[in-house]
Amino acid sequence: MSEQVNTRSLKGLVGTLEVSDVMTHTALSLVPIRGESVGSLDYMLSSEAIPLGLLAVTEVSQAGSVPELLVTSTADKMILLLDGEQLVGAKQNRILNTSILLPPKAKTKVPVSCVEQGRWRHTSTHFEPAMMANARLRSRKSADVTENLRRTGHAESNQGAVWDEVAQSLGVMDVASPTMALHAAYEAYKSPIEGFLKALPYPAGSRGVLAAIRGHFVAVDLFDKTQTLEKVWNRLITGYALDAMIPGAKPHDGITLEAAQRILARIEEVTCQAFPSVGIGEDWRFSAQDVVGQALVAENVCVHLSMFPNDDMGRIREEHERGIEPPSRRRRFSQDDRVY
């Protein structure tokens, strides 16, 4: 692929953003992000369309293909599929590699990653929507997808790294899954997850959220309008909660509003590279020393942005005390490694 890639800036696309009071439950802190909605795109979420029979997600064929799925819409409006959204069923569970805005009544193949290593047989003909993947997995996948887009033009992940992350989460949480399914962790921890959802309800008027674990920034998810965040809130927070329940270093003071505002300011500072989306709009990617992420931009609207600490640079996050991490990927981090 040519090294000449169109560069973009998010400045002016995300609107004026402000942080609100920090919400905390055990190790997880959430900072609501407020700001007027930007644009007026009319779409529905895949998690709404699938139960209504307006969107079918299936294997691409009877034989199937691990890195892609077939989505077929009969809806009269656009459908938003979210980066990190988990789809369970068919031959094996997957997560979406990037956010996609599907045109009305469209059929296309979408890039995904497998989060169930030990199954390759049909348990159903169609996929059903499930919880969002945890932030740690989404962060690693985001960096790898960005690299592959730059090298090959395809939104592919590093499948081996995805399986490593799933295995690590299952291992440290002591979750037994014969097929190594990430979904098993959510099922095993259903009760404590409910505790997170009860303690951290959707903050009215917010269209984004910054998540921190033990005081360390782990993710930002920002949407074009408040209605979208409100609809995905519980699924999104469940993903954050999974990381918050993984044993880690000693508890740390929660994140401050000043630190959250500094992290938020990075959104308008990063330089993005624009790639064609498999749906409507463009897939904007950025990777700096401190942050990595992507934004789905359509009709001059930033529909969904996700930003994570750039772990590949050895920054920000505490080391999880895992005994099963492959030697080739073991690293040591100290409290002083944090950027924010």
Image: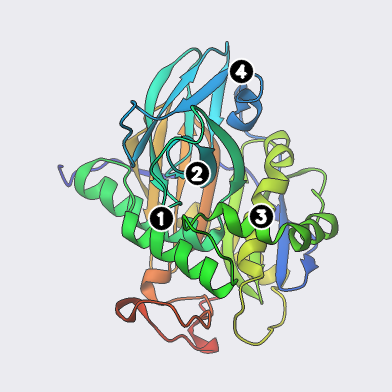
In primary-sequence order, the first of circles 2 and 4 is 4
Residue 100 x %, y %: 47, 33
Image disc number at residue 83: 2
Q: How many marks?
A: 4
**Which residue is pictured at 46% across the width and 19% down the height?**
72
Residue 299 x %, y %: 49, 25
Residue named by callout 1: 141
Picture layout, residue 228 above or below residue 10: above
256 or 8, nearer to the observer: 256
Q: Nearer the viewer, mark 3 or mark 4?
A: 3
- Callout 1: 10 Å neighbours few (<14), some, many (20+)? many
- Callout 2: 10 Å neighbours few (<14), some, many (20+)? many
Residue 308 x %, y %: 50, 61
The three-letter amino acid code for the residue at tag 1 is: Lys
Residue 102 x %, y %: 48, 24
Secondary element at tag 4: loop
Residues under numbered marks 3 and 4 in contact, where contact means CB atoms less than 8 Å apart: no
Task: Give the Cα distance between marks 1 and 4.
Answer: 29 Å
